Amino acid sequence: MRALRLMVGLLSLALVAIPAHSAAAQAGQSRVRVVHASPDAPAVDVIVNNIRSFRSIPFKGITRYASFIPGRATAQVVPAGATQPVVIDAAFDLQAGVDYTIIATGRLAAIAPLVLIDDNTLPRGNRAHVRFVHASPNAPAVDIAVKGGPVLFQNIAFRQVGTYTPIPAGVYDLEVRVAGTNTVALELPQVRLSAGTVSTVYAVGLVGEQPALEALLSVDATAQAQQLPRTGGAVGAALSVLLPLGMLVVLGGL
C-alpha cells in the first residue's frame, strides 16, 4: 500500500460553524468521527492516542462519534486488523465542546483529509438542517437542487462543503447538477428530511468509473440523541461510551 498523506493540523483544516450546543459540549469533551471517501483505498483502522479507536472502516464507511479528552492527540492509520505499515501518522489539537468530522478524500495516490467542525445544534420548529460535502475526486463542481424547485447548494467543488441550510421538513426529490447548468449528474429521489434533525449529504465515488458516483445521507443529530450511523462491517469506536446509531441511506448511483 502506498503511503497516505495526512495533513491534519489547524492550518489545513476546512472548518464549518462551531456548534453552540452539542453532546460533546455537555460533557466538556471533544467528539470525532471518520468518513472513508477515498474510492480506491482499502479498509483501515485508526489508532488514536495508542488505542485502536475506529475499526475496519471501508470505503463509504462513516463511524459513530467517539469522545476524546481535549488537547493534543495523535492518530495513526493502518490496514484493517494490522499494526503495520503505519500509512498515516499525525498529531492535531482537539477543542473542548467541539464535534469534528475527518474525511479521507481523493484517490489513494493523492489522498488528503478534509476536517470539518460540525454544528449539531438542532433546528427549531418544522425544519431540518442539511449540508453537502463534495467528496468525488473526478466530479466537476455541482449544484444541489430540488427537482423543479430551488437550488439549495450552489457551485460546490471537490473538497468543498455547503454550509448548513434550514429546510422545511418533508420528502424531496433532489438533483446533483453540473454547476450552473441543468445537466443532472445524479438523481436523489425521495430524500426524507425530518423535523428536528441535522443531516449531511456526501457525494462519493467516481464519474464514469468504479466505484460509481453516489450520494450518502447521514442523520447526524436528532431530537432524541445526537448520533451517527454505522456502515459496512465493524465500523465503530473504542473510546468511551458511544451514542445510539442513526441511519445511513445510499441514495443513488450512476
Image: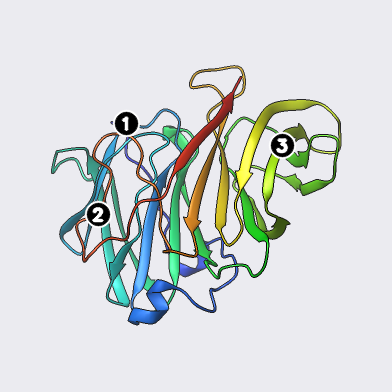
Frontmost of labels 2 and 1 is: 2
**Which kind of residue does numbered mark 3 sit on?**
Leu
The percent position of residue 226, horizontal first and vertical second, equals: 43, 63
**Residue with the mark numbered 3:** 174
First reached walking from the N terminus: tag 2 or tag 1: 1
First reached walking from the N terminus: tag 2 or tag 3: 3
**Which kind of residue does numbered mark 1 sit on?**
Pro
**Which kind of residue does numbered mark 2 sit on?**
Ala
**Residue with the mark numbered 1:** 42
Above-or-below relation of 251 to 159? above
Q: Residue at x 73, y 33 (%)?
A: 175
Towards the viewer: 18 or 73: 18
Q: Residues within 10 Å of mark 3 (few under 14, many from 20)?
A: many
**Residue with the mark numbered 2:** 237
Q: Residues within 10 Å of mark 2 (few under 14, many from 20)?
A: many
How far is the residue under mark 1 from the one under mark 3? 30 Å
Towards the viewer: 127 or 28: 127
Asked whether residue 111 is in view, the answer is: no
Left or right: 213 in relation to 220: right
Quadrant that contains the N terminus: top left
- Secondary structure found at label 3: strand
The percent position of residue 79, horizontal first and vertical second, equals: 22, 37
Q: Residue at x 72, y 56 (%)?
A: 167
- Secondary structure found at label 1: loop
Left or right: 183 in relation to 170: right
The percent position of residue 21, horizontal first and vertical second, equals: 50, 78
Q: Residue at x 78, y 40 (%)?
A: 146
Left or right: 238 in relation to 206: left
